[in-house]
Image (tube, rainbow, N blue to C red):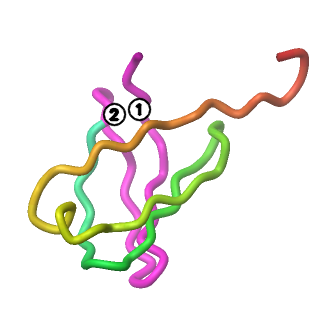
């Protein structure tokens, strides 16, 4: 597993956007039920804030997009 830098993370409810740093870490505001959208150069995906994620770190596994000859 490797870190993925420069991924845009968007809280759909608030429209707040941040980029992952060179270590793949990011910090964004959210509350239970909020949905995060992650993109580009990855299979576009969403993650939902659960109660336990509001006050503690959330790990997200990103999946690379397969465009041609994968």
Image point 39% across, 83% down: which residue? 14
Who's the residue at 50% across and 37% down the image? 62
- For the residue pair 31 and 52, the one nearer the viewer reads as 52
Quadrant containing the N terminus is top left
Q: Position of residue 51 (x, y in %)?
A: 21, 71
Residue 10 percent coordinates (x, y): 45, 65
- Secondary structure under tag 2 reads loop
For marks 2 and 1, give the CA distance: 5 Å
Q: What stretch is highlighted in magenta?
A: 1-24
Residue that protrudes farthest toward the left in the picture: 55
Magenta span dominant secondary structure: loop
Query: Is residue 61 rendered to the left or right of residue 67?
Result: left
Residue annotated with mark 1: 5
Relative to 60, 57 lies left or right: left
Mark 1 burial class by Cα count in 10 Å: few <14, some 14-19, many 20+: some
Residue 25 sits inside the magenta stretch = no
Residue at x 58% of width, y 34% of height: 63
Mark 2 touches mark 1? (CB < 8 Å):
yes
Mark 1 residue element: loop
- The quadrant of the image that shows the C terminus is top right
Circle on res. 24: 2
Tell me the crowding category of disc 2: few under 14, some 14 to 19, or many 20 or more residues within 10 angstroms, Cα based.
some
Tell me what residue is drawn at x 38 percent, y 73 percent. 16
Mark carried by residue 49: none
Taking 69 as reference, is 5 above or below it? below
Note whether 24 is above or below 43 in the view shown: above
Q: Is residue 64 left or right of residue 23?
A: right
């Amino acid at each position: 597993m490797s870190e993925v830098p420069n991924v845009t993370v968007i809280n759909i409810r608030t429209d707040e956007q941040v980029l992952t740093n060179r270590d793949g870490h990011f910090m964004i505001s959210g509350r239970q039920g909020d949905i995060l959208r992650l993109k580009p150069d990855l299979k576009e995906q969403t993650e939902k804030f659960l109660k336990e994620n509001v006050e503690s770190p959330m790990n997200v596994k990103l999946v690379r997009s397969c465009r041609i000859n994968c």
